[in-house]
């Protein structure tokens, strides 16, 4: 056998190199490379073509393993999961500190326990006393949850092995779990991977629905090896601005159902409350239109949400480099849109500071937001409000065309439902064949037409 090489793994993105560096060459993070146990290197002679057991081939249409889901007792959580918890599955939930992951999972555990299921909540970060205090605040202190504080995966699995398998098993968080079989401190790549592997194996073998809480890095991705996301069946992100009340539980990966579904919550005095009709949430509710504000009918999974996009343009007198700041949308996308507006419509933003904000702490992921952002920017630049009670949607191409987007009909209907009267968007997106009587669909196929309408 060849001599094993030294291996360094980035704790942020999981990439592997054989040399230590201060900065990861793949993701650019600093001080994230950690040495891992060397991998065994096999020689070419190593032959795996004999000595194993035969594997079993199965028909696709076996009737007996129908997917039965179990409700978390929280409809918005179920919705984001694509219909509830799947027994024997693993869910990874990431989110900024303090966003409400522990609160949501404590509430879900309590609901499952109150419905007669066995719910186990294991915290590696908080003492039982702290969790009890939170449960009291939430009015859940009488829920029959099995609560424990532990960071040792061996202790956890030994205990679970001696009891009935739980319907819901929460591990808060995977970064603080530790396995004595693996070298390194909790939170290192090999520890996180190894602990997750053991816990997921337990869940699969025993039919428990496992939820792993994951920390996120400062750029918002789940800390630890990327491979963690591959190991689990469902990846969810709990998003929102901590200073705002609203929280979005977003499904980023789902082996059992649709991705992109969201659950909407509001953080209140008694924990997270469900928001079953979020459409009005992210509108400012003001009657008279102001310059720089555009309403965008977003589609999240299967559900429409109307959001207000606000732009502010400040002309600079001096030759200082103008700032561009974005909250709730993609920075690169804004830069692209500004460039297209300059190149195709002759607008000049070069001496202007540009601020873009999505109201209510909402984070837009729908690519159809381009036209609404462009409308907000042009309206702010011209200092003219957009037509009253209008919504805007469409994707902008580099050539300045407005490209059709999915779910046009759904967007129009939602706008109409909330009292909007006209929708500006590309031709084909009107929702072919779907008539929306209360809503006038005004076609905009080119970005310069937008400017003509406003300026
Ligand atoms: P927490 O669930 O501890 O966040 P995470 O586990 O994601 O780090 O959320 C804690 C925050 O939620 C904290 O800042 C206080 C707030 N909160 C409320 O506003 N109301 C409540 O009823 C509870 C329990 C928490
Ligand atoms: Mg927590």
Image (cartoon, grey):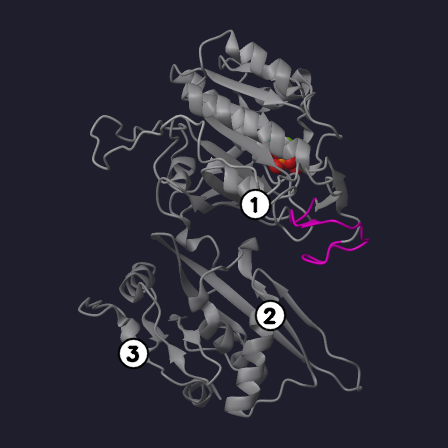
Q: Quadrant of the N terminus?
A: top right
Nearer to us of marks 2 and 1 is 2
Q: Position of residue 183 (x, y in %)?
A: 73, 28
Dot 3: what SS?
helix
**Which callout, 1 or 3, points at the residue further toward the start of the chain?**
1
Disc 2 or 1, which lies upstream in sequence?
1
Return the residue at label 3.
Answer: 427
Quadrant where ligand 1 appears: top right
- 341 sits to left or right of 181: left
Residue drawn at 34 percent across, 59 percent down: 418
- Cα–Cα span, label 3 and label 2: 26 Å
Q: CA distance from mark 1 to mark 3?
A: 37 Å
Q: Is mark 2 within 8 Å of ligand 1?
A: no
Residue 293 appears in the rendering: yes
Q: Nearer the viewer, residue 136 or 176?
A: 176
Residue receiving disc 2: 332
Q: Main secondary structure of the magenta part?
A: loop
The quadrant where residue 59 appears:
top left
Q: Is residue 324 above or below residue 410?
A: below
Picture layout, residue 288 above or below residue 444: above
Residue 42 is left or right of residue 105, and the answer is right
Q: Which residue is mark 1?
A: 245
Q: Is 15 within the magenta? A: yes
**Residue 100 numbered mark, or none:** none
The region drawn magenta spans: 11-29
Spatial CA distance of label 2 from label 1 is 27 Å
Asked which secondary structure carries label 1, the reply is loop
């Amino acid at each position: 056998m060849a001599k094993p090489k030294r291996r360094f793994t980035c704790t942020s993105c999981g990439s592997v190199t054989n040399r230590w560096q201060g900065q990861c060459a793949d993701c650019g993070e600093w001080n994230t490379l950690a040495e891992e146990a060397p991998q065994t290197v096999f020689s070419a002679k190593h032959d795996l073509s004999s000595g194993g057991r035969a594997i079993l081939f199965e028909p696709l249409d076996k009737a007996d393993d129908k997917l039965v889901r179990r409700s978390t007792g929280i409809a918005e959580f179920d919705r984001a999961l694509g219909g509830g918890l799947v027994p024997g599955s693993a869910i990874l939930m990431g989110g900024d500190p303090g966003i409400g992951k522990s609160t949501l999972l404590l509430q879900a555990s309590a609901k499952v326990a109150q419905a007669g299921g066995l719910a186990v909540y294991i915290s590696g970060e908080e003492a039982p006393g702290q969790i009890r205090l939170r449960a009291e605040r939430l009015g859940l202190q009488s829920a029959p949850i099995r609560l424990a504080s532990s960071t040792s995966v061996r202790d956890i699995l030994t205990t679970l092995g001696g009891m009935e398998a739980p319907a819901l098993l929460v591990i808060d968080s995977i970064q603080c779990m530790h396995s004595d079989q693996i070298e390194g401190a909790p939170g290192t790549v090999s520890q996180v991977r190894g602990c997750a592997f053991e816990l997921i194996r337990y869940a699969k073998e025993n039919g428990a629905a496992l939820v792993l809480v994951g920390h996120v890095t400062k750029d918002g991705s789940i800390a630890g090896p990327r491979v963690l996301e591959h190991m689990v069946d469902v990846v969810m992100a709990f998003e929102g601005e901590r200073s705002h009340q609203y929280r979005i539980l977003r499904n980023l990966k789902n082996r059992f159902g649709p991705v992109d579904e969201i659950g909407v919550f509001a953080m209140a005095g008694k924990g997270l409350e469900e928001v079953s009709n979020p459409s009005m949430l992210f509108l400012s509710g003001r009657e008279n239109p102001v310059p720089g504000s555009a309403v965008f009918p977003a589609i999240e999974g299967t559900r429409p949400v109307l959001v207000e996009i606000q732009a502010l343009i400040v002309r600079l007198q001096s030759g200082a480099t103008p700032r561009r700041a974005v909250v709730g949308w993609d920075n690169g996308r804004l830069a692209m849109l500004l460039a297209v507006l300059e190149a195709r419509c002759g607008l000049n933003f070069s001496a202007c500071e540009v601020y873009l904000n999505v109201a209510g702490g909402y984070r837009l992921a729908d690519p159809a937001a381009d036209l609404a952002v462009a409308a907000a920017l042009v309206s702010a630049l011209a200092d003219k409000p957009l037509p009253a009670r209008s919504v805007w949607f469409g994707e902008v191409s580099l050539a300045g065309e407005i490209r059709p987007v999915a779910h046009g009909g759904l967007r129009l209907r939602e706008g109409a439902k909330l009292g909007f009267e006209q929708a500006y968007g590309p031709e084909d997106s009107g929702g072919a064949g779907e008539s929306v009587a209360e809503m006038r669909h005004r076609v905009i196929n080119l970005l310069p037409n937008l400017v003509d309408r406003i300026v």
